[in-house]
Image (spheres, grey):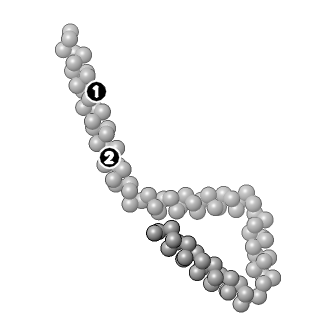
Amino acid sequence: MTDKPSHLVEQRENLINLAAAQRTALAQSIEPWRIPLARADQGLAALRVIKRNPAWIVGGIVILTLLRPVRVVKWLRGGWVAWQMLRGLREK
């Protein structure tokens, strides 16, 4: 009668160790996907915000059409430079 509970305890320990090993293997195999999945999640969150506030899209289009294309290109160039500088600061 005492043999059966000790067998169950041993089997339970083996299953716990197996689950821990599987969690570790899963974490290692998912690691390369962590950054792309995070970016996709951020993109989906941005789409949800835009869906809830469609006036932003219309407002952005109106602003871009009212401004001269040359001015928009200058703004985008300056924004791109600022973005690159911020990314550089974050990575350090």
Q: Secondary structure at mark 2?
A: helix
What residue appears at the point 64 percent right and 61 percent down from the top-left corner?
A: 47
Q: Which mark is residue 66?
A: none
* First along the sequence among labels 2 and 1: 1
Q: Secondary structure at mark 1?
A: helix
**41 sits to left or right of 61:** left
**87 sits to left or right of 30:** right
- Identify the image quadrant of residue 7: top left
> Taking 22 as reference, is 8 above or below it?
above
> Taking 33 as reference, is 84 above or below it?
below
Closer to us: 80 or 7: 80
**Residue extending furthest bottom?**
70
**Residue 28 at what x, y percent from top left?**
33, 53
What residue appears at the point 25 percent right and 22 percent down from the top-left corner?
A: 9
Q: Which residue is mark 1?
A: 12
**Residue 56 at what x, y percent from top left?**
75, 66
Q: CA distance from mark 2 to mark 1?
A: 19 Å
- Tell me the amino acid under the disc marked 1: Arg
- Identify the image quadrant of residue 49: bottom right
**Residue 10 at what x, y percent from top left?**
22, 25
Contact? badges 2 and 1 (CB < 8 Å): no
> Taking 81 as reference, is 46 above or below it?
above
Q: Which residue is mark 2?
A: 24
**Residue 92 at what x, y percent from top left?**
46, 69
Dot 1, crowdedness within 10 Å: few (<14), some or many (≥20)?
few
What residue appears at the point 46 percent right and 61 percent down from the top-left corner?
A: 35
**Residue extending furthest left?**
3
Dot 2, crowdedness within 10 Å: few (<14), some or many (≥20)?
few
- Tell me the amino acid under the disc marked 2: Thr
